Image (cartoon, rainbow, N blue to C red):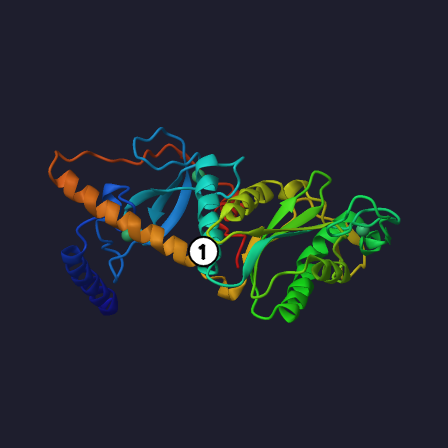
Amino acid sequence: MTSVGHGADRGRQAVRERSREVRHGTSQGQGRTWEEPCWASESGAHRGRVAGYCRTVRDDDLACRRVLSVVCANECGARTVWPCKSHRASVCEPCSARYRLRVRRVASEGMLGHSRSGHQGMLTVTAPTEGTEHSGWVVAWDRRSLRPTCGCGSSMVGGLGSWNASAGKRWNVLRGALRRLYPGCEFFRAVEPQERGALHLHVIIWTPIPLVLKDVQALALAAGFGCVIHYREALAGDTGAAAYVSKYVTKATDQRGEVPWDVLDRESGEVEAVKDARYRTWSSSREWGMTMKVVEAGIRAAAQVRAAAAAVRESLTPATGFAVSPACRSVPPGEWSLAGTVSAVP
Ligand SMILES: [Zn+2]
Ligand SMILES: [Zn+2]
Ligand SMILES: [Zn+2]
């Protein structure tokens, strides 16, 4: 009992201290009770727990189609709302659009950071052409000379589903080979699911010396990609490629369910088709520059500045009430884990 009482004392003390320093919301200014310090915790900070979806029309500016109702897990009674943060446009257009902008920021800042020296551009590598031998893709083909026969389809062992599942490992092999050919090269990689269900990789790549596509094609074929390959050099300051690849990131997230994907069951040795493939829709090299963490911290800082400004404005006008309606349905377990997952980690 004594320890509990002591804890409560410390809690109240923390609240008093926090009240002095916290004049405005710790969230984005959502929910009056959430902006008060938490009396049930020693730090005075609330711990958010998702209680369900909010179905009511709200008058706040939280642009999200499936707003989550959040209660304090310390059971202090505080409530707030969070955006669903879904990366899927089919689930929530505003949240996926914000995600797309964040990804674009990561891609474009990296491009700008590398624009002073070297070369950069967008490299596209593809899945092999299914079937038997075909006329191979020739880099800078003159459209006249005979194209050599290509057997890149032999990398498609076990069909498209197996190849897609191996694309991540194949990219690791290609990435290592590129690093050896172009020491110090940096990249931002995004995945595009093609109509036929095959995955394409769009790679914004920076190299210290000009990239020779013919050499890269040989490396890509050796890593098990198809012979079809593109490279388009970007001029310094041109971040069009960043906009292009970020568009595919949310598209790829939405189409995961339609991408053929097989995995080998290690115990039985059987190949089974997976309904909703999981793959990283984008990733970047360590020295790319901007990370998603930095982008998100910047957004939070800006939100705090906005909240502070709003608090000042509000103190000059009569207070407006805020209530989170209890009319919220519960979130199916599968959906919530999806809503909160950042499935694309660098
Ligand atoms: Zn609380
Ligand atoms: Zn949303
Ligand atoms: Zn080929």
Q: In the rendered structure, which amino acid carries the disc numbered 1?
A: Leu
User: What element does badge 1 sit on?
Assistant: helix
Closer-to-camera residue (168/147) = 147
- Residue at 57% from the left image edge and 54% from the top image edge: 121
Question: Looking at the image, which residue is at 39% across and 49% down?
Answer: 49
Which residue is located at x 40 percent, y 42 percent?
Answer: 83
Query: Quarter-wise, where is residue 260 in the image?
Result: top right
Q: Which residue is mark 1?
A: 112
In the displayed structure, does residue 143 sit left or right of residue 253?
right
Residue 88 rendering spot, x and y as whole percentages: 53, 40
- Picture residue at 66% right of the left edge, 69% below the top: 181
- Ligand 2 contact, mark 1 (Cβ < 8 Å): no
Does residue 188 appear anywhere in the picture? no
Q: In the rendering, at what x and y percent does residue 21 appear?
A: 16, 57
x and y percent of residue 9 in the render? 18, 64
User: Is residue 240 among the parts visible in the rendering?
Assistant: yes
